[in-house]
Image (cartoon, helix red, strand yellow):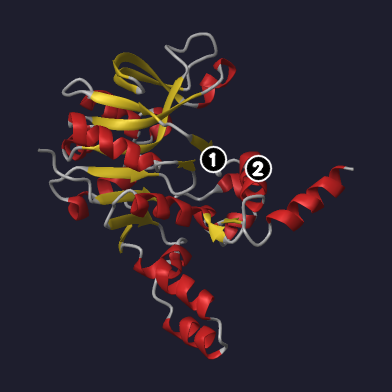
Amino acid sequence: MQLKIRKAIIPAAGFGTRFLPATKAMPKEMLPIVDKPIIQYVVEEAVASGIEDIVIVTGWHKRSIEDHFDYPFELEKRLLEAGKQQQADQVRKIAEMANFIYVRQKGPYGNGTPILNARRVIGNEPFAILWGDEFIYSTPPRLKQMMDVWDKYGAANISAVRVPDEAVNKYGIAAVSDVAPGVFKINQITEKPAVGKAPSNLATHGAYIMPPELFDILSKTKTGKDGELWLVDAINQLAKQRDVYAVEIQNGKYYDTGNKLEYLKAVVEFGLKHDELKHEFAAYLKNLKE
């Protein structure tokens, strides 16, 4: 029987330079999608999938993330005094979603560093990784689909989506072998291959379920491109030692909210789904087009 996935790492220490000047004083993960910051959507996905402990790896400029998931006694008190019970319930629920642990990032640049920084908190058990500035909205949740594959096969795995052939140079693309419908064994991941030279159109990114052995591999992985410690280098090494699967996410849509245009698209889409705003917002957009 496989150990259950109970902990998730969310790296959130980057500078968000693509969104400057907005991110000069505000973390990119805190940019709002209508009325919730991006990272809250990520946390909600993890919690809906059964995660109990959320380890957020931050930097000196990310204090507002910690504040967001904290218990705001003074704010709750003011809301209750003003008769705003629903809003008070919302802010309390945010703090009670999971056990939040914060780790400050130390080490070389690269997306492998925050994972290694969380090693002591994770301990000797399998864990999930989700980036704090992007998410896949799916039913059932993306991470739950991946956890089901872990429970069945005991295999480390990465979420995957099909991308247009002309867009393969934006993602890590996997060479794979079939395991089951929507589940593939990863033979190799090539980061941002040239168009026409990709091994497939299956992009592996966004969320990961990994065994604790990954930490040992990461600690021995040399910095690569641009002097950064890359998670994909460690995963490729892990794939030589044990099977790593790609899980093609069903009934989902990927939102790359670290990209300005895609961020704006996400705001519009979620605005059109918002219970309080959708009708007036749709009418506004229709009139704007005309």
Relative to 231, residue 236 above or below: above
In-front residue for pair 83/37? 83
Q: Which residue is mark 2?
A: 265
Q: Position of residue 251 (x, y in %)?
A: 47, 34
Q: Residue furthest bottom?
A: 81
| Count of marks placed on residues | 2
The residue carrying pointer 1 sits among few (fewer than 14), some (14 to 19) or many (20 or more) residues within 10 Å by Cα, namely some
Asked whether the residues under the numbered discs 1 and 2 touch, taking CB atoms below 8 Å apart as contact, a structural biologist would say: yes
The residue carrying pointer 2 sits among few (fewer than 14), some (14 to 19) or many (20 or more) residues within 10 Å by Cα, namely some
Q: Position of residue 186 (x, y in %)?
A: 30, 20
In-front residue for pair 148/184? 148
Q: Position of residue 100 (x, y in %)?
A: 31, 63
**Amino acid type shown at disc 1:** Tyr
Whole-number angstrom distance, CA of label 1 to CA of label 2 = 9 Å
Ranked by sequence position, the earlier of labels 1 and 2 is 1
Q: Which residue is mark 1?
A: 255
Q: Is residue 159 visible?
A: yes
Q: Which mark is residue 164?
A: none
Q: Residue at x 62, y 40 (%)?
A: 262
Q: Position of residue 196 (x, y in %)?
A: 53, 8
Element class at badge 2: helix
